[in-house]
Image (tube, rainbow, N blue to C red):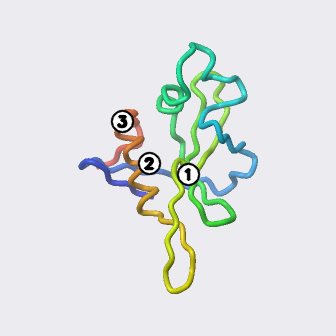
Amino acid sequence: MEITFCNKKYSLPQIAQYQSIPYEAGLCCSHCSNFEREYRSWMDEMESDRVIGYCVDGSGAYQIVLECKYCHEKYRFHMDRHWYEEDGKILFDVEHWKSMVGLHLFNGKHDYLEIE
């Protein structure tokens, strides 16, 4: 998937076999509780963990997949869930999600995913 944000273009690979990657509602790795390691906030930890891709759950909602910088365990969460109705169907707003992920990639300086 390509995501464009602030004139930067990122390539985010899809992870098809995501079921073994734990969902973390706390937005950071619970395996090593990395948010407690340096007494920083979950936002600081999540922002600096490595983004490795995305997946689409069974309901059609997109999730971002990250890798903990301390223990290298992978985890996933929705980042943002926004739905809309079209022709009587409830659909996940992929464009809204992509803009939220783009903001995360840009602010977190995840330049390793940047493409030309």
* Residue 46, label in figure: none
Front of the two marks 3 and 1: 3
User: Spatial distance from mark 2 to mark 1, Cα to Cα?
Assistant: 10 Å
Residue 98 screen position, x and y as percent: 43, 56
- Disc 2 crowd rating (10 Å Cα; few below 14, some 14-19, many 20+) is many
Residue name at image x 68 percent, y 23 percent = 33
Residue name at image x 64 percent, y 28 percent = 72
Look at the picture and state if 73 lies above or below 70.
below
Where disc 3 sits, the SS reads helix
Badge 2 amino acid: Val
* Residue 107, label in figure: 3
Mark 2 or mark 1, which has the lower sequence index? 1
The reply to whether the C-beta atoms of the residues labelled 2 and 1 are less than 8 Å apart is yes
User: Spatial distance from mark 2 to mark 3, Cα to Cα?
Assistant: 10 Å
Where disc 2 sits, the SS reads helix
Mark 2 or mark 3, which has the lower sequence index? 2
- Residue closest to the far right: 20
The reply to whether the C-beta atoms of the residues labelled 3 and 1 are less than 8 Å apart is no
- 114, 47: nearer the viewer: 47
- The residue under label 2 is 101
- Residue closest to the far left: 7
